[in-house]
Amino acid sequence: MELLYLLYLIPTLYSCFLIWKMLEERRERECYILNYQCYKPPNDRMLDTEFCGKLIKRCENLGPNEYRFLLKAIVSSGIGEQTYAPRNIFEGREGAPTLRDGIEEMEEFFSDAIGKLLAKSKVSPSEIDVLVVNISMLAAVPSLSSRIINRYKLRHDVKVYNLTGMGCSASLISMDIVKNIFKTQRNKLALLITSESLSPNWYTGNDRSMILANCLFRIGGCAVLLTNKRSLKDRAMLRLKCLVRTHHGAREEAYGCCIQREDDQGKLGFHLGKNLPKAATRAFVDNLRVMAPKILPVRELLRFLFVSLIKKVNKNNTPKSASTGATKSPLNFRTGVDHFCLHTGGKAVIDGIGLSLDLSEYDLEPARMTLHRFGNTSASSLWYVLSYMEAKKRLKKGDTVFMISFGAGFKCNSCLWEVMKDLGDPNVWDDCIDDYPPESLDNPFMRTYGWINEVEDPYTYENIPDFLK
């Protein structure tokens, strides 16, 4: 009888051990954000209306038609007067940048953001196990990751990943790398650095598809500290629940809609094609198709299935609406998401996502205000949006945050975070969060430069502002 008892007991205990081990391993694979720090350049780098006018005027390749195009683009961009540009632009050297300009721009960001992050997280550089750096449009030797290692004296066995060319969606690609490392290696600390170098990439030609980049992109960056240590769980801000990456590089239209190239005059710039919205929509739809079942409750998925079946049966009775460039999703993503952290690719991008997901102005406010205050800071823009939510004390324990980003290639990446505790650090919004949202987001460019639309030759206009003479 005792032998029979043992025969039952041993397999039961072994099964319990396996279950316990599986749960332990799953806990060790979690990906937590301990802290993050966005970069705010000094105030002498702000691009106000007056300086932008001087910057445009000194570009010899631009004429009246380009001035009018730029006026329309800037006014409708959603960008305000407090965004930042690189030092070489203020020194009048945007047409002849050097490698040193790009490196100094990055080193200023590294010094500020990484230093502040490690200080407020009370983490020593020697504790960092993994370093992931994404700077799309600047490649240097030694690499930018090596410069960080040298500056902060990271350990000799730190695991390093240096990404270039990944565009505005690079943050979540880097996050995916960290997540996969955490699956196989326990008790690790990872430092994720995301930014873009504009110093060597300011376009000085007159190709309209490439001038747009000058209107939208601004300098910025973010340093993020991540871990899978269970002992640090109580200090964590966010927990990664799922991440989905979509890449349409095999489609020629998508591949060529957002690309770095030279214009007819041999001037290097960043081309934004007319088919960009179409490519973005297709990538977005494919990404949501995979992400939706992971983040939405079963009741919403069943409702969608039921509604889809009814529409299929009664397709002839469904009224057709006029095309608006974006299709509204039949799924209600607010049933599984509390906050939407959207890439600040431009006003049209934010409007398009809002229409597709049927979001309210409250949902879109963080992205709109970030675009207005900091512009499109490329891959780091998501963290400025998240910081706005935190500064406004929107993020409460148990909430979920849905991040969505787009990038050249063409890519759409998204992920869902769970808020681990009530958050309220203003980060880079500390001196201006009370001013947002402003009463109006009207751009002062139209008031200052609207006269350009009324004359054939701006240089003969008698009321031209003094600072442009």
Image (spheres, grey):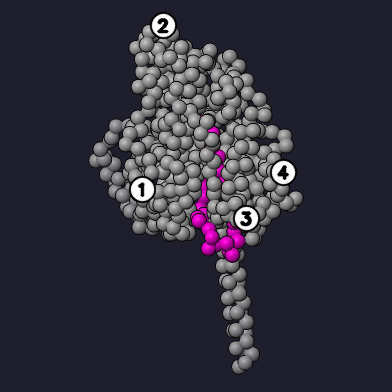
Badge 3 or badge 2: first in the primary sequence: 3
Res 169 visible: no
Which residue is under mark 1? 331
Query: Residue at the spot x=36%, y=48% of the render?
Result: 331
- Say which element carries label 3: loop
Q: What residue lies at 42% left-to-right and 41% top-to-bottom?
A: 432
- Observer-nearest residue: 419 or 180? 419
Kindly indicate whether the residue at mark 1 contacts the one at mark 4 (C-beta within 8 angstroms): no
Q: Residue at x 52, y 15 (%)?
A: 58
Q: Nearer the viewer, residue 90 or 297?
A: 90
Work out how far the residue at label 3 is from the one at label 4, CA to CA, in angstroms.
17 Å
Q: Distance of mark 3 from mark 2, alpha carbons?
A: 60 Å
Among the two numbered marks 1 and 2 on one chain, the one whose residue lies closer to the N terminus: 1
Give amino acid for label 4.
Asn
Q: Secondary structure at mark 1?
A: loop
Which numbered disc flags the more N-terminal residue, 3 or 4? 3
**Residue, disc 3:** 123
Expressed as whole percent of the image width and height from the top left, the position of residue 90 reads 55, 24
Q: Nearer the viewer, residue 161 or 89?
A: 89
Horizontally, residue 421 falls left or right of residue 224, namely left
For marks 4 and 2, the one nearer the N-term is 4
The image quadrant of residue 33 is bottom right
Which numbered tag is attached to residue 460? 2
Residue 59 place in picture, x, y as percent: 53, 16
Q: Which residues are magenta?
A: 217-246
